Image (cartoon, rainbow, N blue to C red):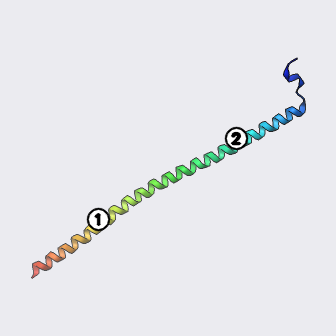
Amino acid sequence: MNAFDEVDDEELESYSEWTFAALLFYALKESAASEQSARMAAMDNATKNAEDMIRKLTLLFNRTRQAVITRELIEIISGAAAL
């Protein structure tokens, strides 16, 4: 006689229910972890894209500002040369 001979149907059903609940809980936790991982990846990509956009816009702003300064200097020099 071994330990499994004395296990009745009610105990097996209880164990089956517990096992199912544990597997369901594990699946829900995996789903939540996967969702958080996907959100982190999306936010990481958004951060990289924002940094790239900031870099490009800063470069455009600096070039435009420098062009305005250069144009104003040329106007001042041209006006002084005309006198």
| Residue located at (89% from left, 34% from top) | 10
Q: Quick one: which residue is furthest to the top in this view?
A: 1
| Residue located at (85% from left, 36% from top) | 14
Q: Which residue is under mark 2?
A: 26
Which type of secondary structure does the marked residue at label 1 adopt?
helix
Q: Position of residue 41 (x, y in %)?
A: 53, 49
Q: Is residue 48 above or below residue 66?
A: above
Q: Nearer the viewer, mark 2 or mark 1?
A: 2
Q: How far apart are labels 2 and 1 at the CA level? A: 55 Å
| Residue located at (88% from left, 17% from top) | 1
Q: Looking at the picture, tell me which residue is in the foreground, 78 or 40.
A: 40
Amino acid type of disc 2?
A: Tyr
> Which class describes the residues within 10 Å of circle 1: few (<14), some (14-19), or many (20+)?
few
Q: Position of residue 31 (x, y in %)?
A: 65, 46
> Which class describes the residues within 10 Å of circle 2: few (<14), some (14-19), or many (20+)?
few
Q: Looking at the picture, tell me which residue is in the foreground, 18 or 50.
A: 18
Q: Which mark is residue 71?
A: none
Which type of secondary structure does the marked residue at label 2 adopt?
helix
Mark earlier in primary sequence (2, 1): 2
Circles 2 and 1: CB distance less than 8 Å?
A: no
Q: Quadrant of the C terminus?
A: bottom left
Q: Position of residue 63 (x, y in %)?
A: 29, 65
Q: Which residue is under mark 1?
A: 63
Q: Is residue 14 left or right of residue 56?
A: right
Amino acid type of disc 1?
A: Arg
Q: How many circles with numbers are drawn on the protein?
A: 2
Q: Quick one: which residue is furthest to the bottom in this view?
A: 83
Q: Position of residue 37 (x, y in %)?
A: 57, 47
Q: Is residue 82 left or right of residue 6?
A: left
| Residue located at (61% from left, 49% from top) | 35
